[in-house]
């Protein structure tokens, strides 16, 4: 029997790599999940940031660390996404969720690969190349 929409979203949180996930909005974030809640039409996560990556860090070194320190002082932060954006499901293949201007990735192997990147790798955009290759699978 096919999974309900709620069950499909609950499945996102199974088999996470070290209880981590990633998101991208105006910056790229690597998070440690504190807790989650799946409601009838949306999900929420409370998480602590592990890494913040911005394009500003190349021209203003220390930007990433400053943002990370600021976010950690407010942790855990609450993020979420509706199951549908208009009439389209926000759940994409391979444990990815898409919202207006915000994406989430929960795939174990993807997060494992991203978690092992160095600060220099992030500054050089290696995470973008990994995400692009991953998103081609969809």
Image: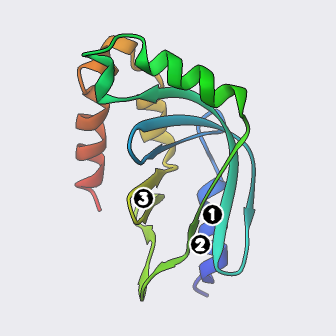
At x 63%, y 63%, the residue is 11
- Secondary structure, mark 3, is loop
Counting from the top left corner in percent of width and height, residue 1 is at 61, 87
Q: Which mark is residue 11?
A: 1
Counting from the top left corner in percent of width and height, residue 51 is at 51, 26
Q: Is residue 61 left or right of residue 8?
A: left
- Secondary structure, mark 1, is helix
Number of residues whose C-alpha sits closer than 10 Å to that of mark 3, classed few (under 14), some (14–19) or many (20 or more): some
Q: Are marks 3 and 2 in contact (CB under 8 Å)?
A: no
Q: Are marks 1 and 2 in contact (CB under 8 Å)?
A: yes
Query: Front-most of 89 and 53?
Result: 53
- The residue singled out by tag 2 in the image is 8
Q: Is residue 109 left or right of residue 1?
A: left
Number of residues whose C-alpha sits closer than 10 Å to that of mark 1, classed few (under 14), some (14–19) or many (20 or more): few
- CA gap between label 1 and label 2 equals 5 Å
Q: Is residue 88 above or below residue 92?
A: below
Q: Quadrant of residue 60?
A: top left
Counting from the top left corner in percent of width and height, residue 64 is at 44, 21
Query: Front-most of 124 and 137?
Result: 124
Q: Is residue 4 above or below residue 67?
A: below
Q: Tell me which label, 3 or 2, sits earlier in the chain.
A: 2
- Secondary structure, mark 2, is helix
At x 43%, y 56%, the residue is 102
Q: Tell me which label, 1 or 3, sits earlier in the chain.
A: 1
Q: Is residue 79 above or below residue 47?
A: below
Q: Quadrant of residue 136?
A: bottom left
Number of residues whose C-alpha sits closer than 10 Å to that of mark 2, classed few (under 14), some (14–19) or many (20 or more): some
- The residue singled out by tag 3 in the image is 94
How is the structure coloured here? rainbow
Q: Is residue 113 above or below residue 88?
A: above
């Amino acid at each position: 029997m096919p999974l309900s929409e709620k069950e499909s979203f609950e499945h996102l949180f199974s088999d996470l790599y070290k209880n981590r996930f990633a998101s991208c909005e105006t910056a790229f974030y690597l998070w440690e999940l504190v807790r989650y809640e799946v409601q009838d039409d949306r999900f929420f996560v409370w998480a602590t940031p592990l890494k913040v990556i911005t394009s500003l860090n190349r021209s203003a070194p220390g930007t990433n660390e400053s943002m990370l320190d600021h976010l950690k002082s407010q942790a855990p932060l609450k993020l979420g996404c509706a199951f549908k954006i208009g009439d389209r499901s926000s759940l994409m293949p391979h444990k990815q969720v898409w919202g207006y201007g915000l994406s989430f990735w929960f795939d174990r192997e993807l997060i494992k690969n991203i978690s092992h990147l160095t600060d220099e790798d992030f500054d050089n955009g290696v995470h973008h190349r990994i995400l692009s290759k991953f998103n081609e699978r969809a």
